Image (cartoon, rainbow, N blue to C red):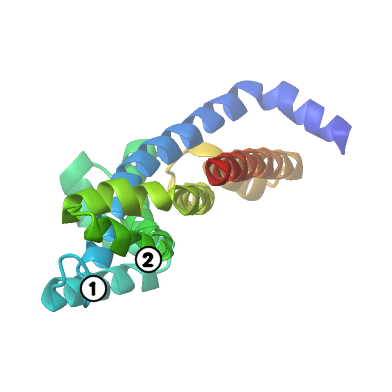
Amino acid sequence: MLNKFIDSFSEYGDLYLDAIRDTGAMVGISLVISAVIGMLLGIVLVVTRPNNLYANAVIYQILNVVINILRSLPFIVLMVAIIPITKWIVGGTIGVKGAIVPLVFYTAPYIARLMESALLEVDKGVIEAYQAMGATRNQIIFRVLLKESRPGLVLGITIATIGLIGASAMAGVVGAGGLGDVAIRYGYQRWEPAVMVTCIVFLVIIVQGVQSLGTYLAKRLRKR
C-alpha cells in the first residue's frame, strides 16, 4: 500500500499539489464568507427569539424557515438548483470559482444553527447580571454572548469546516476542481485505484488536522 502511494505521488505529484491548492482555496474562501454570514444569522436568530434582547417573532420565524429549507437540501441538489444564481454572481458554474457560491449557500445556514446553539448555551444568569449593571443590548451581544461562547463557536466552525471539506470533494463530481475532482476523473473514470486511495488519504489527513486544531483552540479558550 505504501509503495503504491509513493508511486502514485511520484507520477501525479503536480496534479495532487494543484488539487490540494484548489481544495484549500474552495474551503478557505467559502469558510470565511460562510462564517461571516452564518455568525450574523446565528446572532439574529438568538436575539430575535421570544423574550430575548430584540424579540421579533416575524423576523425570527422567517429566518428560521429559510434556514430550515436551505439545510434540508442535499448539497448536490442545492448546487444544481442555484446554477442561475451562481452564473449571475461569478459568471460560470465550473472550477473553483463556480463551486464557492453553492458551498456558501450550503455552509452558511449550517454555521448559523451551530452559532445559535453555542450562543444559547451562555448562562442566562451572566446576562442578567450584566443587564443589572446597566450594560446595553449591543454590549451584551458583543461582550457577553460572543465572549462567553467562544469555545462553542470554535468547535462549531471546526465542524462546519469538516463538512465544507466533504462538500468541496463532492463538488468534484461536476468539475469543481480539487481532490474530489481528481478522485472522480482519475480514480473512478480512468479506474486508477491508487489515485483514489491517495486522494482519500489526503482528505483524511486534512480533516484530522482541522479537527485537532479546533479541539486544541477550544480547550485553550475554556481554560481562560
Q: Is residue 118 left or right of residue 53?
A: right
Q: Residues within 10 Å of mark 2 (few under 14, many from 20)?
A: few
Indicate the quadrant where residue 30 lies. top left
Please tell me which of labels 2 and 1 falls first in the chain.
Answer: 1
User: Residue 79, can we see it?
Assistant: no
Image quadrant occupied by the N terminus: top right
Q: Position of residue 55 (x, y in %)?
A: 16, 72
Disc marking residue 74: none
Q: Is residue 82 left or right of residue 154?
A: left
Q: Position of residue 174 (x, y in %)?
A: 43, 50
Q: Position of residue 202 (x, y in %)?
A: 66, 38
Mark 2 residue element: helix
Identify whether 189 is placed above or below 23. below
Mark 1 residue element: loop
Give the mark count. 2
Q: Is residue 147 left or right of residue 142?
A: right
Q: Residues within 10 Å of mark 1 (few under 14, many from 20)?
A: some
What is the spatial separation of the Cα atoms under label 2 and label 1, in whole angstroms?
17 Å
Q: Position of residue 110 (x, y in %)?
A: 39, 61
Which amino acid, mark 2?
A: Gly
Q: Are marks 2 and 1 in contact (CB under 8 Å)?
A: no
Residue located 60% across and 38% down the image: 213
**Eye-nearest disc, 2 or 1:** 2
Q: Name the residue that disc number 1 marks.
A: 49
Q: Is residue 48 left or right of residue 147?
A: left
Identify whether 141 is placed above or below 213. below
Q: Nearer the viewer, residue 202 or 114?
A: 114
Residue located 19% across and 65% down the image: 53
Which amino acid, mark 1?
A: Arg
Q: Name the residue that disc number 2 marks.
A: 125
Indicate the quadrant where residue 131 lies. bottom left
